Amino acid sequence: MGIYTCNHSGIVIKNCRIVGYTGGIELIYSSSSLISNNTLWNNNGGISLLGSIGDEVSGNEVHSNTDFGIFIISSPSIVEHNHFIQMMDMVYLLHLQTIAQSSIIQYQIMNWLV
């Protein structure tokens, strides 16, 4: 695991390069955190938010991760201006509450694999 936290608030993960891990960044039951301007490359998974509230995921570059780019479960969050390069599965949003309360804004997708 690259960066992992559980039951914390106000975490700032910024300007990191995370390469070659099982998971890139994972926040579980964390709130009001910022994940910004990171590069996640060649991991199994990119960024995961599980049961987290009010987080912001912005300006990250997610490149060549094998399982997913961003995975959000029951986490009303802002997800914007992220870039996906050579990704099969980019963003997963699960649970209707998450979808209704999350913002997904302006993505750049390059070399999308089909």
Image (spheres, rainbow, N blue to C red):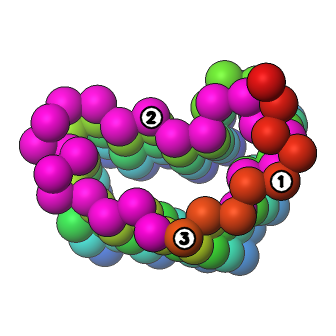
Q: CA distance from mark 1 to mark 2?
A: 18 Å
Question: Do callouts 1 and 3 mark residues in contact (Cβ within 8 Å)?
Answer: no
Classify residue 92 by image quadrant: top left
Instruction: Give the residue at the far left of this rendering.
Output: 97
Q: Which residue is mark 1?
A: 110
Would you say residue 103 sits in the magenta stretch? yes
> Residue 19's spot in the image, x, y percent?
84, 45
On the image, numbered disc 3 is attached to which residue? 106
Q: What's the mark number on residue 92? A: 2
Discs 3, 2 touching: Cβ within 8 Å: no
Quadrant where the N terminus lies?
top right
As shown in the figure, which amino acid type bears the numbered disc 2? Tyr
Tag in front: 3 or 2: 3
Looking at marks 3 and 2 on the same chain, the residue that comes earlier in the sequence is marked by 2
* Residue 86 visible, this orientation: yes
Specify the quadrant that holds the C terminus. top right
Give the residue drawn at x 35%, y 37%: 93
Q: Nearer the viewer, residue 23 or 88?
A: 88
Report, in whole angstroms, how far the alpha carbon at label 1 lies from the one at label 3.
13 Å
**Residue 110 position (above or below residue 60):** above
